[in-house]
């Protein structure tokens, strides 16, 4: 099945070489790149809504998914993105391969590099692990989440969801709520949103705020109602259950009472405000099911859809850059 | 054997002299120090120093090797060569080897092996607790008889306050010096960076700086109430310096060391997770580094150490939080100190005191000064000569130098230990 001609022409017209060899942090992007990437992703959303969803922009390219941490959603999102672009996709599961037998990350990288992957998508529990890999491989490294550092494609897909819901993100007030300290999603979002001019607030208990957060240049709130007052977007973060049991907060029920999002608290946000969550959700812990499943306020399903489109845009754009480098 | 070092610029922190002079060595001893360019009536071997600095050989109180146990990292011989090339005539080896240096036979064994190399003086710090486990006191008295320079559990914190108090109390019987890393182990658990704006952004597990002050306050209180001599191992935060200052003012017998790394780098040097800057204690914000330099200047910090800690590439080339901590440094100590002289404006006397007369006084060594009747441990160096550090060319078996590629000033021309030239010349 061949893709709709108008849609594929639109994608080709918007395609541009990625501004860097790798995507390890959103800080490597500048506002025009972000806009161009989101424009391209918009076109991929159209493609993904067609019956024929494939476009052979990555034909002959190899994409390796290297996930040291479990993530069904992100891994399958990248896998789908790669396959829809015609790439050969290999999913490596380091927990069952030689990495579990004491091989270091660098050994793995060198071995992988010998297989000449064009695109290496990495998730690792250590902050900075993708930077380390990027120094050792010849292809492009995409950070799919490193420790508590960054998750760039998540921030991009969040921004695409917001842009499609509100038009422009520059005027938005976004409240990011919950476990900011341990969240790579929060870091990438704060960086990307402030770069694009949005007003960002961080909301949560002081024990779940990063050190020196008062110097991040964003508003910090410990009172959730005040924190989301007048916000256009309430972005909830996932809270690891093991942090709930007296370690960072006293209990699940106490957390839900003060920082869990329900319709009552949401009333304090701006009328028409949207709710987001990177998933997977702890229903009844950081977010009430009534809110999460309310199509009038929830963008959570959109986020999943945008995830594939944004990753297609990133991969296609990185491949375009590789092409350009090879042609030089 | 009679050698005259003439036309030198003598820098001797012990006497406070910085000026022209010459030194006469007979055998392994300095027999004459003259504040004139030449030695009157000398015939025989002569070293023309050409105005370069002649000072006491450096004394480095904190050097790790991998011997015994992890020789691929570093041997006594490779460490001794690195020290000699760095103008360091005396090093104190740390006890956290495998097995640990926690009993007199081990202290004796390593001391003998080091002496047999005939390069630099290698003393041994004995473990404060058996197996460095922080539970039972090691044989401090017997180890001191065997030559142990001081006692420490190296990087390990002696968590149990009762154990540490007993060690300090017992050490008094021998006038022994006990060193301890001030770090609250609970706050620092799993941390690889200082809690700050930067580490927060980079998502690195971090401990607040106050983790150092909390443990330091405990140690100072114990030193005060026991009357023992405490060496605060690698102080690194401005906050802790305030505590130290107050304690010293009260007459507590506390002394402090600081690593050259914390005087040379700050947390920004981590860059995009460069593991050669993964240190223990972690690098701090620039305000702390500035406070440390001021504390060296005013003498609040007594001793500067290289904190030489070899780690092979496979232990360093890992994600930041999994990488081995530590850096080699004994060979680059002198040019790094010269940076403090050239860039921070410390005088040569001020930067050399913490690596010569001050550590000598702490350990009761005769060396560390230019004086008649003291060991002929000398370093001759050009304080202004530019050097580019190339880690691959350093003597250590491990090449984990954070100074790799740095342009520094200060070149060691000759190192003399016990009257013998062990490097240069």
Image (cartoon, coloured by chain):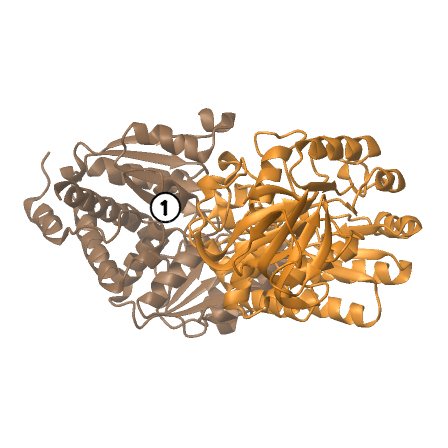
Chain colours: A brown, B orange
The chain holding disc 1 is A
User: Can the viewer see residue A212?
Assistant: no
Q: Which residue is depicted at the point 53% across and 39% down?
A: B395
Name the spot of residue B423 as percent of width and height, x first: 57, 42
Please give left or right for residue B280 compared with residue B395 in the image.
right
* Residue lying furthest right: B173
Name the spot of residue A187 as percent of width and height, x first: 43, 58
Q: Is residue A202 above or below residue B404?
A: below
Please give left or right for residue A29 compared with residue B32 in the image.
left
Quadrant of the image occupied by residue B358: bottom right
Residue identifier under label 1? A143
Total label count? 1
Q: Which residue is depicted at the point 27% across and 39% down?
A: A139
User: Can the viewer see residue B249?
Assistant: yes
Given residues A30 and B107, the one toward you in this image is: B107
Q: Which residue is depicted at the point 35% across and 49% down?
A: A24
Locate the N terminus of chain A by quadrant: top left
Given residues B312 and B213, the one toward you in this image is: B312
Locate the C terminus of chain A by quadrant: top left
Name the spot of residue A228 as percent of width and height, x first: 46, 70
Q: In this view, does B208 lie above or below A230?
A: above
Name the spot of residue A206 as percent of width and height, x first: 59, 65
């Amino acid at each position: 099945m061949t893709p709709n001609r108008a849609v594929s022409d639109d994608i080709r017209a918007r395609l541009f070489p990625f501004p860097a060899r790798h995507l390890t942090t959103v800080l490597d992007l500048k506002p025009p790149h972000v806009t161009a990437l989101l424009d391209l992703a918009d076109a991929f959303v159209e493609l993904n809504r067609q019956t024929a969803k494939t476009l052979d922009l990555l034909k002959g390219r190899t994409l390796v998914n290297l996930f040291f941490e479990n993530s069904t959603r992100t891994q399958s999102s990248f896998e789908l993105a790669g396959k829809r672009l015609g790439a050969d996709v290999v999913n490596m599961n380091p927990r069952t391969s030689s990495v579990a037998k004491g091989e270091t990350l660098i050994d793995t990288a060198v071995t992988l590099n010998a297989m000449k992957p064009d695109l290496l998508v990495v998730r690792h529990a250590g902050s900075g692990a993708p930077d380390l890999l990027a120094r050792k491989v010849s292809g492009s490294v995409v950070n799919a989440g490193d420790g508590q550092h960054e998750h760039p494609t998540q921030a991009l897909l969040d921004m695409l969801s917001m842009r499609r819901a509100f038009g422009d993100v520059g005027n938005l007030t976004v409240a990011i709520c919950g476990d900011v300290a341990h969240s790579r999603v929060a870091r990438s979002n704060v960086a990307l949103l402030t770069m694009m001019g949005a007003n960002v607030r961080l909301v949560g208990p002081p024990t779940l705020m990063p050190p020196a957060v008062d110097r991040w240049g964003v508003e910090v709130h410990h009172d959730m109602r005040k924190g989301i007052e007048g916000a256009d977007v309430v972005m909830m973060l996932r809270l690891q259950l093991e942090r709930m049991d007296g370690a960072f907060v006293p209990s699940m029920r106490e957390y839900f009472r003060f920082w869990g999002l329900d319709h009552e608290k949401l009333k304090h946000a701006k009328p028409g405000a949207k709710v987001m969550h990177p998933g997977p959700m702890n229903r009844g812990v950081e977010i009430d099911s009534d809110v999460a499943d309310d199509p009038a306020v929830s963008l959570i399903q959109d986020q999943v859809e945008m995830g594939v489109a944004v990753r297609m845009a990133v991969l296609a754009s990185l491949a375009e850059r590789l092409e350009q480098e090879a042609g030089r | 054997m009679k050698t005259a070092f003439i036309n030198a610029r003598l820098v001797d922190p012990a006497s406070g002299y910085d000026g022209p002079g010459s030194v006469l060595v007979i055998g392994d001893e300095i027999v004459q120090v003259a504040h004139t360019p030449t030695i009157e009536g000398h015939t025989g071997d002569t070293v023309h120093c050409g105005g370069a600095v002649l000072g006491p050989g450096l004394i480095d109180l904190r050097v790790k090797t991998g011997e015994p146990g992890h020789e691929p990292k570093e041997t006594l011989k490779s460490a001794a060569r690195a020290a000699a090339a760095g103008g360091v005539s005396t090093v104190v080896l740390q006890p956290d080897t495998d097995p640990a240096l926690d009993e007199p036979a081990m202290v004796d064994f390593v001391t003998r092996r080091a002496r047999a190399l005939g390069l630099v003086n290698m003393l041994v710090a004995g473990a404060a607790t058996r197996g460095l486990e922080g539970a039972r006191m090691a044989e401090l008295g017997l180890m001191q008889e065997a030559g142990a320079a001081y006692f420490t559990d190296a990087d390990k914190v002696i968590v149990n306050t009762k154990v540490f108090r007993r060690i300090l109390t017992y050490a008094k019987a021998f006038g022994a010096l006990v060193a301890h890393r001030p770090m609250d182990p609970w706050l620092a658990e799993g941390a690889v960076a200082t809690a700050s704006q930067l580490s927060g952004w980079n998502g690195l597990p971090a401990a607040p700086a106050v983790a150092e002050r909390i443990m330091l306050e405990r140690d100072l209180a114990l030193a005060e109430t026991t009357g023992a001599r405490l060496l605060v191992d690698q102080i690194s935060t401005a906050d802790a310096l305030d505590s130290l200052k107050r304690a010293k003012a009260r007459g507590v017998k506390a002394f402090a060391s600081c690593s050259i790394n914390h005087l040379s780098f700050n947390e920004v040097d981590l860059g995009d997770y460069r593991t050669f800057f993964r240190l223990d204690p972690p690098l701090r914000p620039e305000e702390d580094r500035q406070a440390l330099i001021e504390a060296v200047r005013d003498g609040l910090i007594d001793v500067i150490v290289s904190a030489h800690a070899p780690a092979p590439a496979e232990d360093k080339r890992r994600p930041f939080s999994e990488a081995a901590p530590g850096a080699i440094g004994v060979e680059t100590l002198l040019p790094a100190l010269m940076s403090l002289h050239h860039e921070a404006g410390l005088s040569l006397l001020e930067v050399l005191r913490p690596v010569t007369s001050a550590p000598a006084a702490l350990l009761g060594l005769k060396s560390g000064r230019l004086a008649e009747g003291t060991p002929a441990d000398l370093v001759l160096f050009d304080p202004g000569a530019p050097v580019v550090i190339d880690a691959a060319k350093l003597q250590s078996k491990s090449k984990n130098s954070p100074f790799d590629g740095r342009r520094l000033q200060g070149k060691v021309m000759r190192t003399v230990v016990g009257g013998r030239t062990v490097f240069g010349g």
